[in-house]
Image (tube, grey):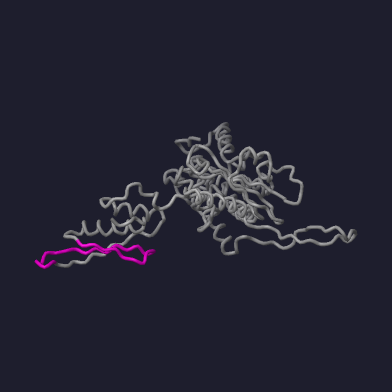
Amino acid sequence: MIAPSNHFEKEEIGGFFVFDQETINDIQNQIGYKFKNQELLEQAFTRRSYSMENGGEDNEVLEFIGDAALNLVAVKILREEFGYFNERKQQNPNYYYLWETYESTFSSDKDEGQLTEIKKRIVRKSTLADAIDDLGLQNYLIMGRGDRKKHVEQSNSTKEDLFEAIIGAIALDTNWDINTIQKVVEKIIDIDDIIGSDEDSYIDMIQNWSLKQYDVLPDYSVCKYLSNEINSGVPDWARPNSIWSVINKPFKQGEFASDTKYASLLTLNGVSNGVLNDDSCYFIGYGHSKNQAKEEASRLAYEYLDEQGLLWTIQNEIEKPCKRLAINQLETLARRGYFSLPTYNFYEEHDEDGNPVWRCECHISEEDIYYWSTASSKKDAKKDAAWRMLRHVLKMEEN
């Protein structure tokens, strides 16, 4: 969608202001929800500055409702991703030879602190503002003259308020249908990217590999899988030894246990038979939560890439390491997250004839070693020290 160049203003028809139907349709298509009461959508986009000048309701109460709804949805998403019920078996009181399985206590793959941090990432201002900005929805805001003059639609605070107001409007329009609200949130926000950003996560490592190799995110499919029941709605890929498996031949497939509740199919594009090409390969993982199933599929993919020598490493980052560009190349590696920015310390010394000689020490906080060099100029000393450190982090052999 191409965002409109001007902010949306209501049209006056017969003394009444109406929300343009074409605009309503465009917004509904983008958020993936069709309002029964379209006036709620109009209200979600109406700033207080407009209602103060022209009367009518603004979106502030909807923001309040949307904030509550968004927090509830975030918790529901985390429960589905990381939570699961433990199962317990008990003897049927009427048939002693039959045992029944029922859900007992609740567990989570993440502790309270970890869940809190992930929830913060989902609902934080920058996440909501970026989602609105990506769709260009701030350009449809109905604002008073003061707001238009100040261009408040460009502020993250205004975009965050709009996001919450839209969710609040949907909550009221659906009578708090939490599943529908969740679908809209997941359409607007890349939840998988937020949840998969934990350090030392196989999901995160596979995502980073795919982004660096092909500039695309890997594709995950997840479905419910009850190992002890008939799975009529389960896709073929989730069934061990299915026709799909015979045809597509997943490179690695996990094993499901008695507590398996979910299956995840990871598709890596551009990898086949241990080489990089235009084909795809598949990895299937099982788990008691969505996240565990995706993590297992990612672990299998990571092991496969490692076995085939296809993992993207620090050595792949710099195509042609050289002394002339060593300072910039070290900084590039630092900005890509391999280590912190290097520091350089200079000391002035003198040779036997009394001429100034500069000594430069290059240090990276994650490394225990300093690399130094001396030269007649600061520039040359720094360049040589950086080159020595670059060779060290890239594990290049000394000439």
Residue 244, by quadrant, is top right
Q: Is residue 229 above or below residue 87?
A: above
**Image vertical order of residue 112 relative to residue 196, above or below:** below
The residues colored magenta run 351-374
- Depth check: give the residue in front, 123 or 56: 123
Identify which residue is drawn at 69% across, 47% down.
Answer: 175
**Image location (x, y in percent) of residue 132:** 51, 45
Q: Residue at x 58, y 33 (%)?
A: 21
Q: Residue furthest left?
A: 353
Q: Position of residue 246 (x, y in %)?
A: 65, 39
**Which residue is outermost to the front?**
399
Which quadrant of the figure contains the C terminus? Answer: bottom left
> Is residue 55 visible to us here?
no
Q: Is residue 299 within the magenta segment?
A: no
Q: Is residue 99 left or right of residue 379?
A: right
Question: Quick check: is 369 in the magenta stretch?
Answer: yes
> Closer to the camera, 248 or 390?
248
**Percent x, y for residue 236?**
68, 41
The mark tally for this picture is: 0
Q: Is residue 395 visible?
A: yes
Q: Whole-percent x and y of residue 36?
A: 66, 39
